[in-house]
C-alpha cells in the first residue's frame, strides 16, 4: 500500500513538470485501446474464420496455418511444430527483457457443429465437430493485443519480447505440460492466458475446479468363436467392463471434489469373435497433485485386478494428457482488474440480448437473464474446503512454472451446459466479436503495465516465489510420454472435406453470418 501511495505522490509532484497531460502509462493505455479498436475488423475475421474451421485437438491444421500467417505478416518469428506437435508453434517478436507470453486454446468439441446466431439445434453438418466451447475466439484477443503492443513498443522505444503460443488440444489437456517440459517457458517472465467466458473477469490464487490425469488402459486376451468355443477365448472387453465396475464401486469411498469419467475407445470387433483387444480411456480429476496421483494408483490397481479376473493382460497404461490445478498471480490479476474496470463490458444491443435469452430458454434454464451488464468482482483464492471440483485446463502447468493469469472475456452466453452445440451459437456473432474486442483491450493495457512498470514484474515474481515455496511443480507426464498427436485424426478425416465447403471467405462476405445467409438473431417462432 505504502509503495502505491508513494508512487502516486511522486506522480503528483514530478509528473506535472514532465508531462502536460496524463502520466505515461495512461497515455500508452489509451493508445493500446485505440490500436485494438482499429483492428476490430481483423478480430471479427479471426473469430469467424477459426469458428468455420471447427477443428478438434491435435488436428488444428487450418487454424494453425491461418494464425501463423497473420503472425508472420506482422513481423513475428514463428517456430512451428514445437514439442513435436505439428499444429503447435512459438511466435516471437522483440528483444530482451521482460519476456511476456500470451496464450489461448484453439481446439473444438466433437459433435457440436452449429449454425451461429440460430437459437435452436441446427448443425452446419450433422455429427461434425464445432466450437461448442468457444476456443475460436481467444487467439483473436491475444494477437490483436500483441500487435497493438508491438506498435507501441516501436513508437516509444520500449524494450522487451512478446511471445504467442496456442493451447493445442486443450480439451484433451494434452500439450501444455510438454511445452513446460521442453523448456518453452524457461525465459518467460509472465504469461497472460485468455479464455472465453460470459463476463470480463480475472481471479487470483488457487482457482476453482480440478487438475487431472488422462490415461488409456489397454488389455489383451485371446480370440475364439464366441458361440462355438467361447471357453477357449479370453475377453479383453471383460477386463474393460470389470475395470469400470471396480471404479464405480470405488467412487463411494472418495472425497467429494473428485470427478472420474471414461469412454471405451476399443470394445472389440464383432460379437461372434471374443475381443482380443479392448481399451478404456479415463479422466481422473482431483484438487491437487497428491490426490490426482492417488487416484492414478487406485486406477492401476483396479486395472491389474480386472486383468487378473478376466485372465487377460494389461498391455499398456498410456498417459494421454495431464493438467495441474490452476493457480493465478495476484499482482498481475490486480493490475488487470484495474484495466477491466476501465474497459467495462461491451454494449449489447437488443439483438444480442434477444439471442442470449432465446438460447437460455432453449437450454431449459429457469432464469432467463440474457447477457450480463455488470462486471464480475475480482475474486481471490478458492480454499479447498469450498472447492467442489469441476473442469480443468492445462494452463495449470504453466501457472506453476511462471507467473500467470487467465483473462476471461465475454464472448459467450451465461448459463449453458458447456461442451455442447448451445455453447457454439454465439461464437460467430456480434456477441463473440464485441467480447473479443473488450478482451483484447484489457490484454493490451495489461501488456503496457507489464512492459512499462518494472515493479509489477518484480511483484509478480515475488508472489510466484511464495506460491511455489511449499508446493513444487512436478510433471504428471513421465519422461517417456509423448504427445498423443494422432488423436482425433480419424474423426477429422471423416468430416474435413465436407467442412471445407463452409470455411469462411472474408473476401466475399463481410461476416460468417452473411456467408451462411443467417438473419441475426434467428429465433424459433412460438
Ligand atoms: Zn476451454
Image: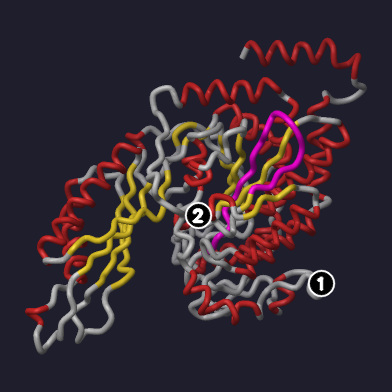
Q: In the image, what residue occupies the spot 23% across and 52% down?
A: 299
For the residues bearing labels 1 and 2, Cβ distance under 8 angstroms: no
Helix, strand or loop at mark 2: helix
Is 524 displayed left or right of 233 in the figure? right
Which one is in front, 524 or 340?
340
Q: Position of residue 405 (x, y in %)?
A: 57, 37
Q: Earlier in the sequence, mark 1 or mark 2?
A: 2
In the rendered image, which residue does mark 2 sit on?
170
Q: Which residues are magenta?
A: 90-108
Residue 205, horizontal then vertical, whole percent = 48, 31
Residue 176 lies within the magenta run: no
Q: Which residue bears the numbered disc 1? A: 507
Q: Is residue 342 above or below residue 247?
A: above
- Residue 389 has which mark? none
Residue 229 relative to residue 464: left or right: left
Q: Say whether mark 2 is within 8 Å of ligand 1.
A: yes
Residue 274 placement (x, y as % from top left)? 18, 79
Amino acid at each position: 500500500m505504502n509503495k502505491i501511495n508513494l508512487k502516486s505522490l511522486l506522480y503528483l509532484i514530478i509528473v506535472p513538470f514532465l508531462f502536460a497531460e496524463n502520466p505515461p502509462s495512461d497515455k500508452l493505455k489509451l493508445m493500446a485501446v485505440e490500436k485494438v479498436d482499429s483492428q476490430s475488423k481483423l478480430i471479427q475475421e479471426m473469430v469467424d474464420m477459426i469458428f468455420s474451421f471447427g477443428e478438434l485437438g491435435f488436428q488444428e491444421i487450418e487454424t494453425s496455418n491461418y494464425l501463423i500467417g497473420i503472425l508472420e505478416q506482422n513481423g513475428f518469428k514463428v517456430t512451428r511444430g514445437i514439442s513435436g506437435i505439428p499444429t503447435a508453434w512459438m511466435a516471437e517478436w522483440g528483444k530482451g527483457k521482460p519476456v511476456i507470453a500470451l496464450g489461448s486454446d484453439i481446439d473444438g468439441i466433437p459433435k457440436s457443429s452449429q449454425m451461429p446466431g440460430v437459437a435452436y439445434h441446427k448443425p452446419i453438418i450433422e455429427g461434425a465437430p464445432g466450437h461448442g466451447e468457444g476456443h475460436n475466439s481467444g487467439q483473436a484477443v491475444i494477437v490483436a493485443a500483441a500487435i497493438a503492443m508491438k506498435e507501441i513498443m516501436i513508437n516509444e522505444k520500449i524494450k522487451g519480447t512478446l511471445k504467442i503460443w496456442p493451447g493445442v488440444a486443450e480439451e484433451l489437456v494434452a500439450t501444455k505440460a510438454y511445452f513446460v517440459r521442453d523448456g518453452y517457458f524457461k525465459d518467460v517472465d509472465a504469461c497472460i492466458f485468455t479464455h472465453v467466458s460470459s463476463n470480463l473477469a480475472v481471479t487470483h490464487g488457487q482457482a476453482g475446479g480440478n487438475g487431472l490425469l488422462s490415461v488409456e488402459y489397454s488389455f489383451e486376451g485371446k480370440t475364439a468363436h464366441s458361440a462355438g468355443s467361447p471357453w477357449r477365448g479370453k475377453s479383453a472387453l471383460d477386463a474393460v467392463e470389470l475395470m469400470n465396475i471396480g471404479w464405480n464401486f470405488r467412487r463411494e469411498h472418495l472425497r467429494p471434489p473428485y470427478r472420474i469419467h471414461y469412454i471405451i475407445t476399443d470394445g472389440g470387433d464383432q460379437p461372434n469373435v471374443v475381443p482380443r483387444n479392448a481399451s478404456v480411456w479415463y479422466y481422473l480429476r482431483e484438487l491437487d497433485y497428491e490426490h490426482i496421483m492417488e487416484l492414478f494408483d487406485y486406477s492401476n490397481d483396479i486395472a491389474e485386478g480386472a486383468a487378473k479376473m478376466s485372465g487377460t493382460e494389461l498391455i499398456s497404461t498410456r498417459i494421454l494428457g495431464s493438467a495441474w490445478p490452476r493457480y493465478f498471480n495476484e499482482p498481475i490479476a490486480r493490475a488487470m482488474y484495474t484495466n477491466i474496470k476501465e474497459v467495462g463490458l461491451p454494449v449489447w444491443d437488443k439483438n444480442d440480448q434477444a439471442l442470449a435469452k432465446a438460447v437460455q430458454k432453449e437450454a431449459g434454464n429457469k432464469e432467463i437473464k440474457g447477457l450480463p451488464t455488470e462486471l464480475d468482482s475480482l475474486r481471490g483464492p478458492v480454499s479447498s474446503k469450498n472447492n467442489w471440483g469441476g473442469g480443468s485446463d492445462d494452463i495449470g502447468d504453466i501457472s506453476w512454472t511462471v507467473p500467470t493469469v487467465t483473462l476471461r472475456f465475454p464472448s459467450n452466453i451465461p448459463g449453458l451446459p458447456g461442451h455442447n452445440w448451445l455453447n457454439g451459437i454465439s461464437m460467430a456473432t456480434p456477441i463473440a466479436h464485441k467480447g473479443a474486442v473488450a478482451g483484447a483491450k484489457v490484454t493490451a493495457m495489461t501488456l503496457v503495465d507489464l512492459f512499462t512498470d518494472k515493479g509489477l514484474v518484480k511483484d509478480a515474481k515475488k508472489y510466484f516465489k511464495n506460491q511455489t515455496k511449499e508446493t513444487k511443480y512436478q510433471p504428471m507426464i513421465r519422461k517417456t510420454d509423448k504427445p498423443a498427436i494422432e488423436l482425433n485424426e480419424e474423426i477429422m478425416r471423416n468430416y474435413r472435406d465436407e467442412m471445407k465447403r463452409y470455411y469462411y471467405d472474408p473476401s466475399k462476405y463481410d461476416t460468417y453470418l452473411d456467408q451462411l445467409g443467417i438473419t441475426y438473431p434467428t429465433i424459433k417462432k412460438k
